[in-house]
Image (cartoon, rainbow, N blue to C red):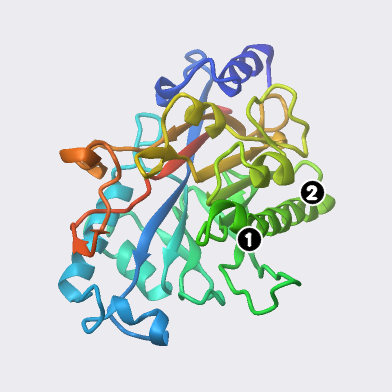
Amino acid sequence: MNRLLASLGLLLAAGSITASATEPIRLSEERRVATYGVAFYNLENLFDTINSNGKFDREFSPQGSREWNSEKYAVKLNNLANAIANMVTPATPGGPAIIGVAEVENISVMTDLVNSEPLRNRGLAIVHHDSPDLRGIDVGMLYDPTQFTVLSVTNHMLLIPENPDFRTRDQMCVTGLLAGDSLSVIINHWPSRLGGQEESEPMRLAAASLTRHIADSLWALNPMQGIIIMGDLNDDPFNKSCAEVVGAAPDAIGVADHGFFNPWWRILENGRGTLTYRGAWNLFDQILVSGTLLPGRGNLTYRNAEIMDIDFLKQTEGRYAGMPWRTYAGGKFLAGYSDHFPTEVFLYKEIVE
């Protein structure tokens, strides 16, 4: 990478260029770069209408408390598909290359999602694994096979020695080729704050330790492997799980090859988040970028990060105006999208012509 491109990358990674950086970069008439989106979206209880998990699944059935039926399911699918279809930028007109997802019940709902009208022509492929979570929700991946090629998938169970009966979502690690370069994506949905943030924190610290172990194992095989950690972490960037256990720093400068940069830290400090609790913003939906993806390290280079809080994903009136337009609130079907906004990071690579 020549000095001009490296210098540009340093500015981007340091946050000097923000939202407008999704415009295509053109270095000259002879040299340019391609941009690739890597996104995450918590789909907020994407369940079908079949009770397949006993008491934990009953609410998402026609006889359950939510009276979840085919009509509501169809609305939910179309809304989410429309949200994903609109995750485009001038630099990524075809949408993200990779979309990690959380709160999906099974591969069937993911198949219904990609076959919904707004996404039908995108040709998105699916990676899914049934995890032991008691609620029956999993993480998964949608990807554009014209941009990303899957090479391997491993799934990792979170075991808590002090609580051997605890079951939550497995962590999924997908390794493949993005624009011809090796990239591993670790998709997470860490344990919730149910019972209180402090009381439940040990579970998330254990989850963060597992995530870090997966990353270190990848680097043991390939020290320059590009790694992205993404997911609903149920913690903010400055919480111990992210900042200390994973070791994700708020600024790109100074991050080692085997460290992580957390671009969402400064975004949250500036008052923006992906979900709200009691009127305050949190930013649980994070995408962490390894030092090996920062400027001057390899072919794929981190460019910028964005909360994809598209206007139609927001509630438009009342006390919750500007917050995510969710599917249910107070037991009432709102016909919305999700209680989380999607997030996305952008990577670029020089095109050699």
* Badge number at residue 219: 2
Q: Residues within 10 Å of mark 2 (few under 14, many from 20)?
A: some
Using the rendered image of the protein, determine whether residue 348 is visible from the camera's viewpoint.
no
The residue pinned by badge 1 equals 151
Q: Position of residue 249 (x, y in %)?
A: 67, 32
Q: Position of residue 45 (x, y in %)?
A: 36, 65
Q: Is residue 214 left or right of residue 274?
A: right
Q: Is residue 158 left or right of residue 334?
A: right
Residue sitting at 53 percent across and 51 percent down? 234
Q: Position of residue 87 (x, y in %)?
A: 34, 42
Q: Which quarter of the rendering shows the C terminus?
A: top right
**Amino acid tagged 2:** Trp
Label whose residue precedes the other's in the sequence (1 or 2)? 1
Q: Which quarter of the rendering shows the N terminus?
A: top right
SS assignment at label 1: strand
Nearer to me, 45 or 290: 45
Which of the 4 image quadrants contains residue 89? top left
Q: Is residue 343 left or right of residue 256?
A: left
Q: Is residue 201 left or right of residue 331?
A: right
Nearer to me, 220 or 6: 220
Q: How many marks?
A: 2
Nearer to me, 191 or 290: 191
Position of 108 relative to 206 (above/below)? below
Dot in front, 1 or 2? 2
